[in-house]
Structure formats: structure tokens, C-alpha cells
Amino acid sequence: MLQSLSCRSCLRMTDKNRSTWYFAFLMSGYVLFLGLGAVVFTAVEQPNEHYLRLDLYELKRLFLQQYPCLPENRLEALLATVLEASNYGVSILNNVSAHWNWDFTSSLFFVSTVLSTTGYGHTVPLSDGGKIFCIFYSLIGIPFTLLFLTALVQRIIVYVTRQPVLYIHIRWGFSKPAVALCHAFFLGFITFLCFFIIPAAVFSSIEEDWNFLESFYFCIISLSTIGLGDYVPGEGYNQKFRYLYKFGITCYLLLGLVAMLIVLETFCELPQLTTFRKMFHVKRKKHEDQEAIAENDQLTFSSISGQTVILKEEQKLNEPFVTLQPFSSDADNGPVNQ
């Protein structure tokens, strides 16, 4: 008897804290995912780093052997200065000295990477004034950019996602969750094709040192706002139409970011994902429910009016394309018999 009561109490406790258990499993899975990424990158990249170090040490040894009059500390001082300048986007090589990192189009490209939080790191402010301005500009500009992108995505998604799904659901009577799921995958495929596959092919043809894999890698890293900076387009010394090319890349990054946000918002609105996300949410307490009920009571009139507008729109969508006009009786025929 006591054992059955204890089992029941354990089941009630488990059911009551189900979202907490789900969140614990989610957190454990995320920690394991982080560890898996670290293990894979260590196994894959550490040997390449080791070989690269050996090659550099051997190259340095051969250079000092060939020029014994140059002390090793002088060479290391020169290399340190060159590497520091390279971190600021300034190169000592003759074939790239004609390019300026802070002309208008390059600055526009830099601003777009800062505000979109991509941040390639290939160009950074040199002066103290530029660093101070970048601090305040990013503190104001990043929230402003998030506000603008949120408002833009919310407007676009009405015409790209919600209206097409509602139209197909009402017109042909398909299940709305099924229509929304198919539409989300179709939109994701179109976005993947237009902003990843095609641009990767374009970049691989324009950039001489990039193959398709490297170009595709650049598109993924850029539009996911990671921005590692190991591949930056338009930095070749013989780049044709560099200013126009930089401006086009800026437009591509902004449009691609909007497209990615639209796809993510479309998937987040799926009923299947909504149910899955609610598994990890904390249940509302009683006083929060009472506050929500009070707010709903205050917004009753506006909610009813909004539902009325939605019903009218659904009725318009449900109307056939061709409507038959009723026949009208001629005045010469006299009144219609009852």
C-alpha cells in the first residue's frame, strides 16, 4: 500500500515537473553537442596546424641560412610588424597596395558587417576616434537594425507565408498544418537555391582562388552571421569593378539575412515546432493566468473586431473567382407575382 502511494506521488511529481526534466535533457544534449564539435575540430584541424607550423619553421630556417647577415631577432620584429598591420587589413605586398580599405564602398561593406553582427575582422578601425565612433555606432545601430529587420520580416511574411497558406487551406480544403509544413520546406528550398547554391557558383567564377566548396562555405558562414573572416570577397589585387562588386556583396548580405529570417520565422510558426517548443517552457502560475485573463477582458472589443476582419477576409478568399449575377426583372413586365 505504501509502495503504491509512493509510486503515485513520484508519478505526480514527475508529471508536474515534466518541462523541467525536458529542459534538463535539452541542456545535457547541448553540452554534449558542444563537446562533440570540440572533439571533431581537434581531431581534424590539429594535424594541419602542426604541419603548417613545421613548414613555417623550416621556411624561416632556410631564409636565415640564405641570408646569414640578417639577425633572427630583426627578422622576427619585421614579421611581427607585418602581421600586426595585416590584422588591421593593411598589407605590405606590392600587388595589393593599390587597394584602400576605407573608401566609401569598403566602408559601406564594413558597416553592413558590423550592424548585421557578421564581423569578418578583415578590416578594423585604426584610429582612436574610429574605435570610439564604432563603439557608439554599433551600440545604437545593432538594436536599430534588429528593430528594422523584425518589422520588415513581419510585413513580408504576411504575403510570403501566411496568406498563401491560408489561401490554399481555404480554397482546396487541405489541412492547414500540412500546408504550412510543405510551404516551409518549399520556401527553404527556394532560399537555399537563390542565396547559397547560385551565389556560390557566382563567387567561384569571380574569385580566382575560390572553388565551389569554399564559396559555399563563405555563403553559409556569412548569412548565418558567424563571419570568420578567412574568406572575404573582393580582396584580390586584380579584382575587376571592385567598387561595384563590393556594393553588390553588401546588398547580397542584407537581402540574404532578410531571407534567412523569413525562413526561420516561417518554421517557428509551424504548429509542430510550436508544440515541441512548449515542452521546454515553464508553466504559468495562477496569478499570471489571472493577469492574462484581465488583459484579455480589456482587449475583448479589439479582439472581436480583429476576428471579424479575419472572417471577412476568409469569406472573400472562399468566394469563387466567377460570380453569377441574379436575373433582374424588366420594368415592362410589371411587378413580380408573389
Image (cartoon, grey):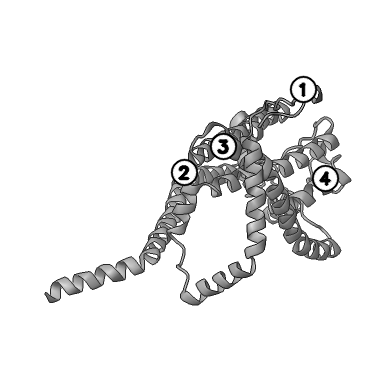
Please, is residue 192 above or below residue 46 in the view?
A: above
* Of the pair 234 and 248, the residue shown nearer to us: 248
Label 1: few (<14), some (14–19) or many (≥20) C-alpha neighbours in 10 Å: few
Quarter the N terminus occupies:
bottom left
Q: Amino acid at mark 1?
A: Asn
Q: Earlier in the sequence, mark 3 or mark 1?
A: 3
The span from disc 2 to disc 3 (Cα, nearest Å) is 52 Å
Residue 72 image position (x, y, % from top left) = 67, 53
Residue 125 image position (x, y, % from top left) = 80, 57
36 displayed left or right of 336:
left
Comparing marks 4 and 3, which lies closer to the viewer? 3
Residue 152 image position (x, y, % from top left) = 73, 49
Label 2: few (<14), some (14–19) or many (≥20) C-alpha neighbours in 10 Å: few
> In which image quadrant can residue 190 be found?
top right
Label 3: few (<14), some (14–19) or many (≥20) C-alpha neighbours in 10 Å: some
The residue identified by callout 2 is 44
Q: Earlier in the sequence, mark 2 or mark 1?
A: 2
Q: Is residue 64 visible in the rendered structure shown here?
A: no
The residue identified by callout 3 is 170
Quarter the C terminus occupies:
top right
